[in-house]
Image: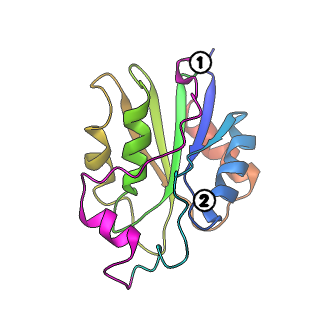
């Protein structure tokens, strides 16, 4: 049996709404990646070179702390991981999450929201955070707030 999980990080709520619909479409459990220190509007001001998100994204070794709820990853075969695209890649908090759990022999399918860019170098930046036996698939940028039915078709097209 292919048990699925939708994991997401959402700074503003956009990715959260998408993840909730994807969870329904994929008949998957859902889990939110929560930063120990929540992001404020000032933290997310990409025009401010001193904003927290800007500083984190300039340092690819940055690993923002997350609340560890002892998620039992071993129960899942396929994990959808969603996030907003920041500076053409996943926020470094996604690396924190991937380095917290063992994703050996798992399939990770990425989905994201973006103000205009694609996945960019996302896979390259995430691969070092998982074991060699983990398969990371570049899924989709889903900006148009797709319906559960549209997401169901996408999930079915993935064969999971």
Question: Callout 2: few (<14), some (14-19), or many (20+) C-alpha neighbours within 10 Å?
Answer: many
Quadrant holding the N terminus? top right
**Most common secondary structure along the magenta stretch:** loop
The mark that comes first in sequence, 2 or 1, is 2
Image location (x, y in percent) of residue 135: 37, 30
In which quadrant of the rendered image does the C terminus lie?
top right
Task: Report if residue 129 lies within the magenta region.
Answer: no
Relative placement, left or right, of 38 versus 145 is left
Q: Which residue is mark 1?
A: 75
Residue at image position (30%, 26%) is 131
Residue 75 coordinates in the image, percent (x, y): 59, 18
| Mark 2–mark 1 distance (CA, rounded to whole Å) | 24 Å
SS at mark 1? helix
Above or below, 132 relative to 153: above
Label 2 belongs to which residue?
A: 15
Image coordinates for residue 113, horizontal then vertical, percent: 53, 63
How many labels sit on residues? 2
Question: Which numbered tag is attached to residue 4?
Answer: none
Q: Magenta stretch: give its range.
A: 47-75
Q: Are marks 2 and 1 in contact (CB under 8 Å)?
A: no
Judge by depth and name the residue closer to the eye, 145 or 73: 73
Q: Going by the picture, which residue comes out furthest to the front?
A: 37
Asked which secondary structure carries label 2, the reply is helix
Q: Nearer the viewer, residue 159 or 94?
A: 94
Q: Position of residue 50 (x, y in %)?
A: 33, 79
> Residue most toward the bottom?
47
- Asked if the stretch drawn in magenta spans residue 60, the answer is yes
Where, by quadrant of the figure, is residue 104 drawn? top left
Tell me the residue at 44%/40% (across/down): 97
């Amino acid at each position: 049996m292919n048990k699925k999980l939708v994991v997401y990080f959402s700074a503003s709520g956009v990715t959260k709404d998408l993840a909730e619909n994807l969870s329904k479409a994929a008949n998957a459990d859902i889990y939110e990646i929560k930063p120990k220190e929540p992001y404020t509007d000032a933290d997310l001001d990409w025009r401010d070179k001193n904003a927290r998100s800007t500083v984190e994204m300039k340092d690819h070794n940055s690993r923002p702390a997350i609340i560890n709820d002892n998620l039992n990853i071993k129960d899942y075969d396929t994990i959808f991981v969603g996030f907003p695209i920041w500076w053409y890649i996943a926020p470094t908090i996604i690396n924190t999450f991937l380095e917290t759990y063992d994703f050996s022999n798992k399939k990770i399918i990425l989905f994201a929201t973006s103000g205009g860019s694609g996945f960019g170098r996302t896979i390259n930046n995430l691969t070092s955070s998982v074991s060699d036996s983990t398969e990371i698939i570049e899924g989709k940028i889903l900006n148009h707030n797709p319906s559960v039915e549209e997401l169901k078709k996408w999930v079915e097209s993935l064969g999971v």
